Image (cartoon, grey):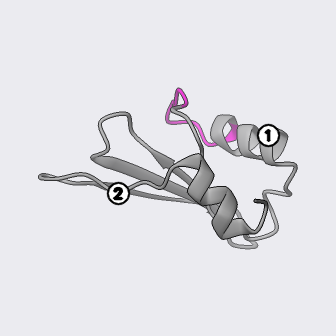
Amino acid sequence: MACDRPRRYAPRLPEPRASGQESLKRDPHAGDLYVFRGRRGDLIKIIWHDGQGACLFTKRLERGRFLWPSIVNLLRMSGHL
């Protein structure tokens, strides 16, 4: 699951995990990936639950940006459009 707009992200895990659960109506313990991209596009954070606890993967690019689909394309890929 990817966020459709920038979200304030503090180094605590519960905030983005809770925002995904509330806005997407999904169980964060089901193994779904929650993907957050920084405003500049050079930072990506992925949060998931591996059965034992929450895991966080962070990647910052030195050059370039992560390509990010528009919300319309995300809805098409998920079959909601």
Span shown in magenta: 7-14
Q: Secondary structure at mark 1?
A: helix
Q: Locate residue 42 relative to residue 7 in the image: left or right.
A: left
The location of residue 51, given as percent across then percent down, is 76, 73
Q: CA distance from mark 2 to mark 1?
A: 23 Å
The location of residue 45, given as percent across then percent down, is 46, 52
Q: Locate residue 23 relative to residue 7 in the image: left or right.
A: right
Q: Is residue 11 magenta?
A: yes
* Above/below status of 68 relative to 29: above
Q: In percent of the image, x 51 and y 32: which residue is there?
A: 6
Q: Locate residue 28 relative to residue 37 in the image: left or right.
A: right
Q: Nearer the viewer, residue 12 or 35?
A: 35
Residue topped by disc 2: 67
Q: Nearer the viewer, residue 9 or 52?
A: 9
Q: Residue reaching furthest front?
A: 81
Q: Nearer the viewer, residue 73 or 46?
A: 73
The amino acid type, in three-letter code, at marker 2 is Leu
Q: In percent of the image, x 61 and y 58: which residue is there?
A: 74
Residue topped by disc 1: 23
Find out whether the residues at labels 2 and 1 contact each other: C-beta distance under 8 Å: no
